[in-house]
Amino acid sequence: MELSTSTIPDFVRNAEILFLKGLDSIPMAARTSGIFRVDNISDHKGNTKEYSEIDLEEYAEIKGEGDQAARAKVQQGYSKVGTLYRVAKDIGITYEMRHYNKYIDVVARLENLGKTVANRMELDLSHRITFATDTSYTSKEGVTIDTTVGDTLAWASTVHTVRGSATTFRNRLANNPLFSRGSLEGMEQMIIENSINQFGEKVTIPYDILWTTEDANTVNTVKEFLKSTASPDALNAGVVNVYSGKYRHVVLPKVATTAIGSNDSTKAKYWGLASSMNSQAFLGVNEEPHMKAANGNVEFSTEDFNLGSTAGYFIVVPGARSFTISTGDAAA
């Protein structure tokens, strides 16, 4: 179908269709990973929302005959506020593009427009993992992005604190090894020893996600490891693979990138475990990626038809429980 401004409503309708086609072509790996919880933020509720950890003590107490039962203790953990921001990208479709046999170019521009804001949301989500060992990073626009959790430490730290105890916990694997059976078991042991509530009591957190970058060797190793019918390192085929079906493998292509979205080989070996059920990382969405058209349709002086795409959201992580990482670089 030819795109033309002879009937403006038809042009806008076709533009919307092509925008959605471009949007649908984006694999939203980080958003759909389970690492982040999606929270829909309605209009007229302000531009911020606070998230807080809260725990009930883990164990009941012995009750003597005729005695009143002990009151349960509740401990609020750390809080973190998410603040909405908007991303956008505009294009102009020239008169010549619309009328002089440039249909393919117009379609390409509109489909690419649909990708830009969704790509940016995916990049921002991925960069929370990319810069998980840092307390902030500088975005491509030069804006400082706070990546701390509620205890003011980086999302990945060896000394996270809780509010009701002096006990600390870590969610960054010691010595940051590459993925292997030994390192996976080491991370599982770290989780066992470091899953605590705000009282410092041991708790059980079910981890169901094994995430990696798209590094070919790491991805292939994980696939072989999880899908092997026998133990991955067994000498005989009769040994059961205890990891079969234990985790869902999530590949995050944009984690190994710089702040501007270029390839960053220093992040290529990142991997870790996460819990979708207990995730403490939130994506608050006020505006899903959508298309906008300029009022007045065609600009008088240039005869351009101006279109744009935009989205509004925030990313906030109040607590570090339910997420672990190894940077794979053997850093201490």
Image: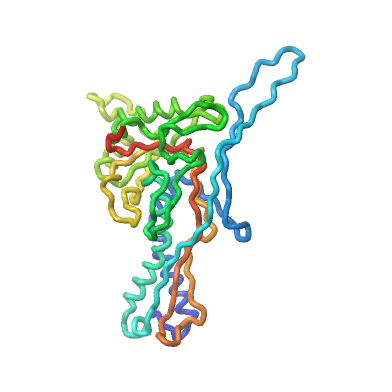
Q: Which image quadrant for residue 183?
A: top left
Tell me how the rendering is colored.
rainbow
As drawn, 178 above or below 253:
above
Q: Position of residue 222 (x, y in %)?
A: 30, 38
**Most extreme residue toward the top, as rendered?**
65
Please determine whether, in this image, residue 207 is positioned above or below residue 250.
above
Looking at the image, which residue is at 54% across and 45% down? 80
Residue reaching furthest right?
A: 66
Seen in the image, is 157 located left or right of residue 39?
A: left
Going by the image, does 227 lie left or right of 114?
left
Q: Tell me the residue at 42%/57% (across/down).
A: 143
Quadrant of image for the N terminus = bottom left
Q: Is residue 36 above or below residue 139?
A: above
Q: Please provide percent x and percent y for residue 256.
A: 31, 48
- Along the line of sight, the residue nearer the viewer: 131 or 92: 131
Residue 265 at x, y = what percent?
26, 47
Image: 315 above or below 278: below
Outermost residue toward the left? 235
Residue under the point 48% across and 40% down: 152
- Image-quadrant location for residue 103: bottom left
Residue at horizontal 48 percent and vertical 50 percent from the top:
315
Quarter of the image that includes the C terminus: top left
The image position of residue 296, as x and y in percent, is: 51, 82
